[in-house]
Image: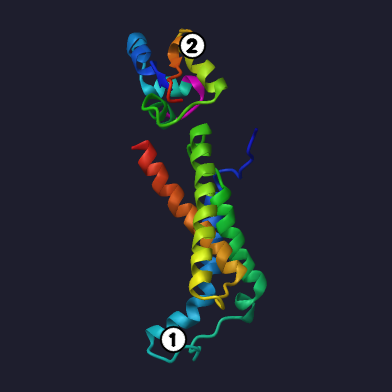
């Protein structure tokens, strides 16, 4: 079975998009905090488009792009590490979800945050496993 | 599954990188196979055996625990 992933340069595109779309909407809050103003004061104002749903969607897509891009070195060993990591991430998030719901029945999480957490978890576990298996 | 890649590499005096280049994988993959951290696909196993000029059944040996 062949698995089609994005070319390596998508890592750079994804990371750049993530930094731009992920950090830009938070600049206002950062400036508020940095200048000692109350949260939400918005001493600096950026165009409303940066707070739009489409802009947030781009952030998630950029992380996905980063996660799905091929590594510089990529072969069947790397592919196996990646697939095993996906398997681990699936069960880890499932277990965490069950535990949280057992603790707090009324707990709710936005699907987009859940998705983002899964991707970040994937990237972290994948990196750690690669370091362990290669060294 | 144990393998004799390291022994055969030493016999032919080729490095992990050279073997990796010839079979189209990374040096890390050859290292992982030698250390039994990764079991290669049948295609890769055949390629390695061909480069090392040995029989695949000799190069890769299945253990009872597999």
Image height check: is A46 above or below B4? below
- Looking at the picture, how far across and down is residue A67, in whole percent? 54, 51
Q: Nearer the viewer, residue A112 or A56?
A: A112
Q: Residue at x 34, y 14 (%)?
A: B7
Q: Residue at x 54, y 59 (%)?
A: A94
Image disc number at residue A132: none
Q: Residue at x 38, y 23 (%)?
A: B16
On what subunit does the disc labeled 1 rest? A
Same chain under badges 2 and 1? The reply is no
Residue highlighted by disc 2 = B57
Element under disc 1? helix
Image disc number at residue A32: 1
Is residue B32 at least partly visible in the picture? Answer: yes
Is residue A71 at least partly visible in the picture? Answer: no
Image height check: is B51 above or below A99? above
Q: Residue at x 35, y 18 (%)?
A: B6
Q: Give the quarter of the figure containing the N terminus of chain B.
A: top left
Q: Which residues are magenta?
A: B22-27
């Amino acid at each position: 079975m062949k698995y089609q992933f994005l070319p390596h340069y998508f890592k750079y595109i994804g990371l750049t998009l993530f930094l731009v779309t992920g950090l830009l909407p938070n600049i206002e809050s950062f400036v508020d905090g940095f200048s000692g103003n109350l949260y939400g004061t918005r001493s600096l104002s950026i165009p409303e488009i940066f707070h739009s749903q489409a802009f947030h969607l781009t952030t998630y897509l950029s992380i996905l792009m980063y996660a799905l891009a091929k590594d510089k070195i990529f072969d069947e060993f790397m592919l196996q590490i990646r697939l095993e990591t996906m398997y681990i991430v699936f069960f880890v998030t499932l277990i965490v979800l069950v535990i949280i719901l057992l603790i707090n029945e009324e707990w709710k999480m936005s699907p987009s945050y859940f998705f983002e957490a899964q991707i970040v978890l994937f990237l972290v576990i994948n990196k750690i496993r690669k370091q362990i298996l290669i060294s | 599954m144990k393998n004799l890649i390291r022994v055969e590499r030493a016999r032919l005096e080729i490095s992990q990188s050279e073997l990796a280049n010839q079979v189209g994988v990374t040096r890390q993959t050859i290292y992982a196979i030698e250390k039994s951290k990764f079991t290669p696909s049948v295609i890769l196993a055949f390629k390695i055996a061909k480069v090392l000029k040995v029989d695949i059944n000799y190069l890769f040996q299945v253990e009872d625990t597999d």
